[in-house]
Amino acid sequence: MRILITSPGPEAVDLVASLSARGHDVVAIPLITPERIDSPEIKLEGAQGFLATSAEGVRALADTIAVRFFPIFAENAEVAKAAADAGFTKINVAKGDASDFASLIENTVNPDSGALVHACHANETTAVTGMLANMGYAIRPLKLYTLKRADALPHALLTDLKAGAFDGSVVLSVDEARAFTTLLQRAELEHLVKDWVVYATSTLASAPMRALKVGRTVVAPDPDVETLLAVFDQDLANPPKPEPEPEPEPEPEPEPEPEPEPEPEPEPEPEPEPEPEPEPESEPEPEP
C-alpha cells in the first residue's frame, strides 16, 4: 500500500519507520511547520500545573521553561510520551476524549488551587479548555509556537497525486488534515482522493477530510500512534467486503397497444315522409 503522511515532527518519523517496516511504500511531505514564538510571555505565578494537548506543545514548553516538578495533564498517550521524553515526572494521562480529559483534571486538582497553564500554538482552540472554564478552572494560555501552512501543494506531491500514486493517507492531527483539505480544494483536485482510505488518530483529526468525500475513513479508538497502527493492521487483514452491486431491474414489458375501437355504424337515413294525396275536386252544384 502506498501511503501519504503530511504530519511534521518526530511522530511522523516514527510512523514512517513503522509503516515501512510493514512493507508499505510511505511518502512523507509535511504541509504544516511548527515555528517557535520568540520570547513568549510566561506567567507561572499562582499556577498549579500544565495543560498539554499536543506533543509539539510539550516540546515547546520544555524548550522554554526549566520547571519539571509541576504536574502536567496530557490529553493522550502520545502527548504523555513527549512529556516523559522532556523530563516531566508528574504526568497525568487522559484517553484523548475532551470529557475524559476534563474529568481527569477535576478528580486530580481543585480549581481554587491555582491556574492551569495551557502550552499551545497561537491559534489553538480546544473543547477541553472551554469545558474546564465552565467548571471553574482558570486556564492561562501560553502561546509557544505557530503553525505555518504550505501555500500550495508541493510539486512532488502534486505530481504523485495526479499520477494516482497513493492508496490513502494517515492523519495524526486536525491541523494537517485542514491544510491538506484546503490545498486540495484550492487546486480543484478533490476527485483524485475519491478511492482513498484515510486512517486517523481521532474523529476530530479526520473531520476535515469528510469534505473531500474519500472512499473510506478508519478512526482509532485511542488517539496515539500505536493504537492507530494496530487498527491499520487489523483493517488490512480484514478489509470490508465490497457491497454487491444491485441487480439491474428488469425492463418492464411493453404494454399491449389498445385495440382500435370499432367505427360506429352510420345511422340509417330516415325514410322520406309520403306526400299527402291531393283532395278530390268538389263537383259543381246543378243549376236550379
Image (cartoon, grey):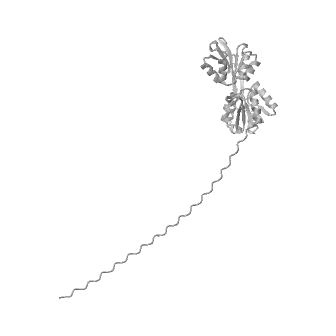
Residue 151 visible to an observer of this rendering: no
Q: Residue furthest top?
A: 45
Seen in the picture, residue 102 relative to 26 is either above or below; the reply is: above
Which one is nearer the viewer's eye here, 180 or 137?
Answer: 137
Q: Return the x and y of residue 77 as percentages of the image width and height.
A: 73, 23
Q: Residue furthest left?
A: 288
* Residue drawn at point x = 70 percent, y = 36 percent: 216
Seen in the picture, residue 50 relative to 280 is either above or below; the reply is: above
The quarter of the displayed image where residue 276 is located: bottom left
The quarter of the displayed image where residue 175 is located: top right
Figure label count: 0
**Left or right, residue 128 beside residue 235:** left
Q: Return the x and y of residue 38 as percentages of the image width and height.
A: 70, 18
Identify the image quadrant of the C terminus. Answer: bottom left
Q: Return the x and y of residue 285 as percentages of the image width and height.
A: 22, 86
Which one is nearer the viewer's eye here, 93 or 225?
Answer: 93
Which one is nearer the viewer's eye here, 37 or 244?
Answer: 244
Seen in the picture, residue 97 relative to 87 is either above or below; the reply is: below
Identify the image quadrant of the N terminus. Answer: top right
The quarter of the displayed image where residue 37 is located: top right
Seen in the picture, residue 258 relative to 177 is either above or below; the reply is: below
Residue 235 visible to an observer of this rendering: yes
Q: Return the x and y of residue 19 as percentages of the image width and height.
A: 79, 31
